[in-house]
Amino acid sequence: MKGSPLIFTDLDGTLLDRDTYSFEAALPALDCLRRNAVPWILVTSKTRSEVEFWRTRLGNEHPFIVENGSAVFVPHGYFSNTVGGAKHSGPYEILEWGAPYEDLVGDLHRASRASRCRVRGFHEMTPEEVAALCELPLEQAVMAKQREHDEPFRILDPDRASRLRFTIEAQGRRCVPGGRFWHIFAGNGKAAAVQSLSAIYADEYGAVRSIGLGDGLNDVPFLNAMTLPVVIRSSEAAELKIRVPRALVSERPGPAGWNEAVLRLIGAEDRPA
């Protein structure tokens, strides 16, 4: 396959273990990416604060996509030219497609009342409650609540979930299931964000070969936008394979599967001819 490789990866359940948040099993592949100067972009429903925390731990210095594709953050000076249409804030050039967080919270409650489906949103939860539900340290739960364009929520009346989803989408918002919560957001999601960022890389470096890795149903649109999609083994792998028929499927789950897939796809470029 021609083109410079470009990795787009989900975090929870993919590069990070869903239960322990460890990425130790992925270290050989991360070293391989660094040796080969392959950009690897985090694509997640997490907030900017959370991703900044994980980028530091992972040693990642590349752009990143947050809150289900609502915004792309590009470090200043990363590309030779400024990013068209981006706003400048702190150390980043930022492309945003999401709606203001307060608007989404209001839309969620209007849809909840109209569909008679009770919900409990992140904004209603204490940091301690988020920490318990997500099995996070309290400091990371505080980061998870610093939302700008996406509201996670729990559905309290599962039998009315489809009615709630229909009502949210009728308001012009997106509604997708995640690993632990549902999410309401605006814009075209992860797929549009990765396509926009891929185009910027292509302008800078020429043809790119996008490789996407994800483990959940909310990753389907962005995986289908990839040159080569990879499904990381999970309870949803069979359904994902149906929805992303071109995808490779890892043998193992989480960071072990991520490591396996990246070494398989990039590792050959690490070996002398």
Image: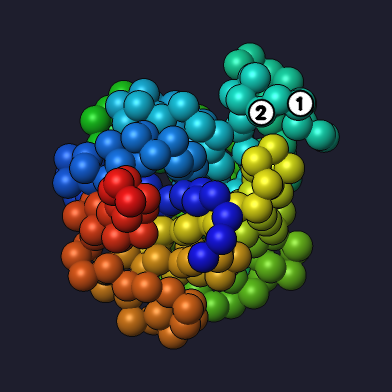
Viewer-closest of 99 and 237:
237
What label sits on residue 79 in the rendered view? 2
Label 1: few (<14), some (14–19) or many (≥20) C-alpha neighbours in 10 Å: few
| CA distance separating discs 2 and 1 | 7 Å
Residue shown at 75%/63% (left/top)? 171
Is disc 2 in contact with disc 1, using a CB cutoff of under 8 Å?
A: yes
| On screen, residue 151 above or below 76 | below
- Tell me, yes or no, if residue 270 can be seen here: yes
| On screen, residue 263 above or below 162 | above
Residue shown at 17%/40% (left/top)? 24
Residue shown at 40%/66% (left/top)? 230
Residue 152, image x and y in percent?
Answer: 48, 50
**What amino acid is found at the position of numbered circle 2 in the picture?**
Phe
Residue 163, image x and y in percent?
Answer: 58, 77
| On screen, residue 44 above or below 162 | above
Residue 260, image x and y in percent?
Answer: 24, 58
